[in-house]
């Protein structure tokens, strides 16, 4: 009489976290049980892995600037570090998706093109333009002194796009692969909760960076009467020894020869405070548009589609940061 073999144990939250780290970064982790439950946990935790990657690349950026490198070169090194820390998988997915969508072929043929190991002209052009925009945008915001803030925000927002791309109801384009493992595994509630945490973190980055790195006071609450004693939109120059260049910023102490009564004053406008949350919203919007296009053309998401969403969302976030910070 044969016995029914025991069923394999289901995955745990720890397995999902391991899957998130192992899939989205080069950091070595011991693999655990891999199933769709673990895939859902991994995609829910993806923004936090992105934040860690952003901190690592921000350290590269800060180190390059400390060595005296120009913002453009420092930004290029930071973007290169991000590619290395992710094994270039997201960039590879972006190139493959560009080739598949650019081919104009039916879904099955487009998916076959995406599976090829080579890269076509659409992929090359898309890859080069995306990296160019990322480096240019990061260089722009780095020159204004907020490069680390933008980089951490963009990396977290790029991985938040994965959370929403794997929401319940989003199909997989193929029966196998990463897309089939994670598509439709994230419920609406966890997705909203993680999004709220990312938005709160993005909003907290500018004052935390200003207070911790610049040793500057935080912006007073708008309802504070001391705030209204200052002229709206007044911009104070920051001494070159603060940033290493002439600049104006939202947080900090006014120069000694400026009579502000010793108050903590706002520099410029509220865009420095609102910029990172706006960047997150822009990243999700860009990723939503691309995911919708991919699902319509391919019938669902694949690992390449998810990688492309990360890069497009990251790029959109950096561009918005460059525009408003």
Image (cartoon, rainbow, N blue to C red):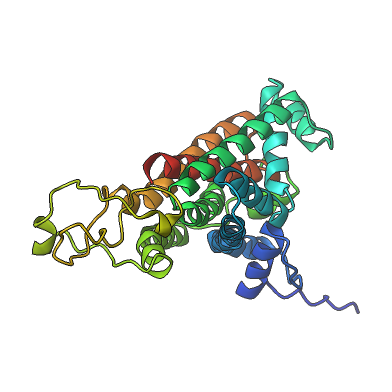
- Relative image position of residue 323 (x, y in whole percent): 40, 39
Nearer to us in this view, 47 or 146: 146
> At 46% across and 56% down in the image, what residue appears?
149
Q: Based on the displayed image, in which of its 4 quarters is residue 294 positioned?
A: top right
Q: Residue 12: in sight, yes or no?
A: no
- Relative image position of residue 45 (x, y in whole percent): 56, 63
Nearer to us in this view, 304 or 209: 209
Task: Answer with left or right where residue 91 lies relative to residue 316.
Answer: right
Task: Answer with left or right where residue 43 lies relative to residue 265.
Answer: right
- Relative image position of residue 95 (x, y in whole percent): 71, 35
Q: In which quarter of the image is the N terminus?
A: bottom right
Task: Answer with left or right where residue 206 lies relative to residue 268.
Answer: right
96 shown above or below 156: above
247 shown above or below 116: below
- Relative image position of residue 93 (x, y in whole percent): 70, 41
Q: Based on the displayed image, in which of its 4 quarters is residue 242 positioned?
A: bottom left
């Amino acid at each position: 009489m044969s016995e029914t073999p025991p069923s394999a144990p289901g995955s745990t939250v720890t397995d999902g976290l391991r899957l998130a780290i192992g899939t989205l970064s080069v950091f070595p982790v011991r693999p655990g049980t891999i199933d769709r439950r673990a895939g859902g946990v991994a995609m829910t935790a993806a923004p936090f892995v992105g934040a860690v990657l952003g901190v690592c690349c921000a350290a590269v950026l800060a180190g390059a600037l400390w060595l005296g490198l120009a913002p453009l070169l420092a930004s290029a090194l930071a973007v290169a570090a991000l590619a290395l820390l992710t094994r270039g998988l997201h960039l590879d997915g972006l190139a493959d998706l560009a080739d598949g969508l650019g081919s104009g072929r039916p879904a099955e043929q487009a998916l076959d093109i995406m599976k090829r190991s080579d890269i076509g002209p659409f992929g090359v052009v898309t890859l080069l333009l995306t990296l160019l925009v990322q480096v240019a945008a990061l260089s722009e915001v780095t020159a204004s002194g907020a490069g680390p803030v933008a980089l951490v925000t963009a990396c977290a927002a790029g991985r938040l796009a994965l959370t929403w791309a794997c929401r319940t109801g989003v199909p997989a384009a193929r029966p196998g692969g990463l897309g089939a493992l994670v598509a439709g595994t994230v419920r609406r509630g966890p997705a909203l909760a993680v999004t709220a945490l990312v938005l709160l973190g993005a909003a907290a980055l500018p004052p935390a960076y200003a207070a911790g790195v610049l040793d500057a006071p935080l912006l007073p609450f708008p309802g504070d009467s001391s705030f209204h004693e200052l002229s709206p939109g007044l911009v104070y120059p920051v001494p070159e020894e603060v940033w290493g260049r002439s600049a104006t910023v939202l947080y900090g102490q006014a120069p000694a020869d400026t009579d502000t009564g010793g108050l903590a004053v706002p520099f410029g406008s509220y865009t420095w405070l609102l910029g990172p949350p706006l960047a997150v919203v822009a990243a999700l919007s860009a990723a939503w548009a691309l995911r919708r296009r991919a699902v319509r053309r391919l019938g669902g998401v694949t690992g390449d589609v998810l990688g492309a969403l990360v890069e497009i969302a990251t790029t959109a976030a950096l561009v918005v940061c460059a525009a408003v910070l």
